[in-house]
Amino acid sequence: MIENDVLTLVNKGEMLPLMEEFYTIQGEGFHKGTAAYFIRVGGCDVGCHWCDVKESWNAETHPPTAIESIISNAAKYSDTIVITGGEPLTWDMGPLTLGLKERNLQTHIETSGAYPLSGVWDWICLSPKKNKLPEGEIYDKAHELKIIIFNKHDFIFAEEQAAKTNKNCILYLQPEWSVRDKMVPLIVDYVMKNPKWKVSLQTHKYLNIP
């Protein structure tokens, strides 16, 4: 009975499978260098082979946690809250983001867009994956598009995805960490030839912080 009650709350977004939460510096994209509190939600079926947080994939390994607790912890540290995963849009983000906004906190999401957009967001970082493409309105709502470059074909994918975004969306190319030495020169060359794009690096890894 208790398990059913918990499942109901998870399905409503009132509890979420919490993998980890931590205060650090945003390392990527437009807000890099900004102090931010990260909430990493478990659960993802997109299955990128180079994912550096594969332990987030199975939601059942992460305890369902009341959003009141998550919000209370987040409010202690920063005005900027980043929801990431896993794939956070697996779950209803409405209750969590409304609670954060009631505390006057800035809500950011990092998502593949593989599920319908839910929640109230000040910043949407859309990072599409070939395995499971974005759904619906998120192309129109995204503030930044971040394409991970693992091989040369990813530049073609990047252009296909950029063509679907809104005119104000900032476009980023980011090397996949394990092949960064090989891909960075290609990205630099590509951005210089196609200056609508910007280079994004995982600066937190260079700084050796979470």
Image (tube, rainbow, N blue to C red):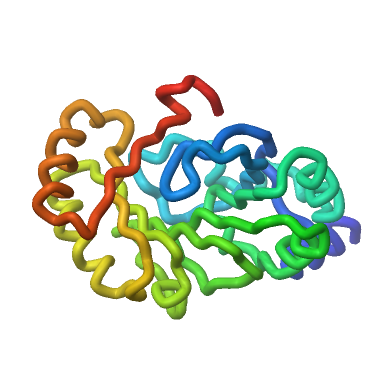
Front-most of residues 97 and 178: 97
Residue 188 in the image: state x and y as whole percent: 17, 40
In the image, is 198 to the left or to the right of 138?
left
In the image, is 174 to the left or to the right of 141?
left
Q: Is residue 7 visible?
A: no
Q: Is residue 79 visible?
A: yes
Front-most of residues 53 and 30: 30
Q: Quadrant of residue 129?
A: bottom left
Q: Residue at x 75, y 63 (%)?
A: 101
In the image, is 114 to the left or to the right of 152?
right
Q: Quadrant of residue 93?
A: bottom right
Q: Quadrant of the C terminus?
A: top right
Q: How many marks?
A: 0
Q: Is residue 46 above or below residue 78?
A: below
Residue 200 in the image: state x and y as whole percent: 33, 43
Q: Quadrant of residue 167?
A: bottom left
Residue 128 in the image: state x and y as whole percent: 36, 59
In the image, is 14 to the left or to the right of 117?
right
Q: Quadrant of the N terminus?
A: bottom right
Q: Residue at x 71, y 63 (%)?
A: 97
Residue 149 in the image: state x and y as whole percent: 24, 45
Kindly give the residue lying farthest to the right in the view shown.
1
Q: Is residue 116 above or below residue 159?
A: below
Front-most of residues 65 and 102: 102
Q: Residue at x 40, y 73 (%)?
A: 139
Front-most of residues 30 and 37: 30
Q: Residue at x 46, y 22 (%)?
A: 207
